[in-house]
Amino acid sequence: MRELSPHCRSESCVPRSRNRRSDEAPANSSESQVERKWIWFRPEIGGRSRSQEEFDDLPAAGRGRLLAVVKRHIAGESRRKDIDHLGSGIYELRTRVGNDHYRVLFANWGPHWVALTAFYKNQQTTPKQDLDRAKDRRDRWEARFGKTPR
């Protein structure tokens, strides 16, 4: 007999979609779905995208692999090893090429994601300076554009 989720009371319980809560309507309902967007951090409207510049500066092999991870996340198909919550509302998408670990730190902004910084490292933990940069950029984003989109 399979183990039931604590939220499931019957054998016919089917896991819910990762992209919706159990009290939300299914994706094929007539209600319009909000399109989730991946947004690169920019300190001001029309300003240059610093996080995308950091991403573009990554070596080609790592950039390609990391882009595939970002696309999987946008499609709602992230794997457990792809993503980690670092605390304070900061998440990490990650991949590895050889001994180099490639990362994009991002935050939720309403239904969307804001990529805050991109980098690579050759150590296990996320460097404090990169985490601090992500938190600072998230705070600047929310101060400029609000905690949720209007």
Image (cartoon, rainbow, N blue to C red):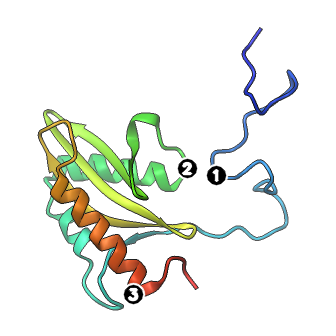
Q: Residues within 10 Å of mark 1 (few under 14, many from 20)?
A: few
**Sequence-earlier tag: 3 or 2:** 2
Tell me which amino acid carries mark 1: Asn
Q: Nearer the viewer, residue 94 or 8?
A: 8
Q: Any mark on residue 144, and which?
A: 3
At mark 1, the secondary structure is loop
Which residue is nearer to you in this view: 133 or 150? 133
- Say above or below: 37 vs 123: below
Residue at image location 21% in from the left, 40% down from the top: 125
Name the quadrant containing residue 117: bottom left
Residue with the most extreme top position: 1
Q: Position of residue 123 (x, y in %)?
A: 14, 38
Q: Is residue 13 left or right of residue 148?
A: right
Mark nearest the camera among 3 and 1 is 3
- Crowd tier of the residue under label 2, counting other residues whose Cα lies within 10 Å: few below 14, some 14–19, many 20 or above: few
Amino acid bearing label 3: Arg
Which residue is found at the position 57% from the left and 67% from the top? Answer: 111
Comes first in the chain, label 2 or label 1: 1
Q: Which mark is residue 76?
A: 2
Residue 19 numbered tag: 1
Query: In the rendered structure, are the residues bearing label 3 and label 1 in contact, judged by CB atoms less than 8 Å apart?
Result: no
Find the distance from the CA under tag 2 to the CA under tag 1: 7 Å
Residue at (14, 46) in percent of width and height: 121
> Where 25 sits versus 32, above or below?
above
The amino acid type, in three-letter code, at marker 2 is: Gly
CB under 8 Å between discs 2 and 1: yes
Residue 126 location in percent, x, y? Answer: 22, 46
Under circle 3, the secondary element is helix
N-terminal-most mark, 3 or 1? 1
Location of the C terminus (image quadrant): bottom right
Left or right: 112 in relation to 128 = right
Mark pair 3, 2: CA separation? 28 Å
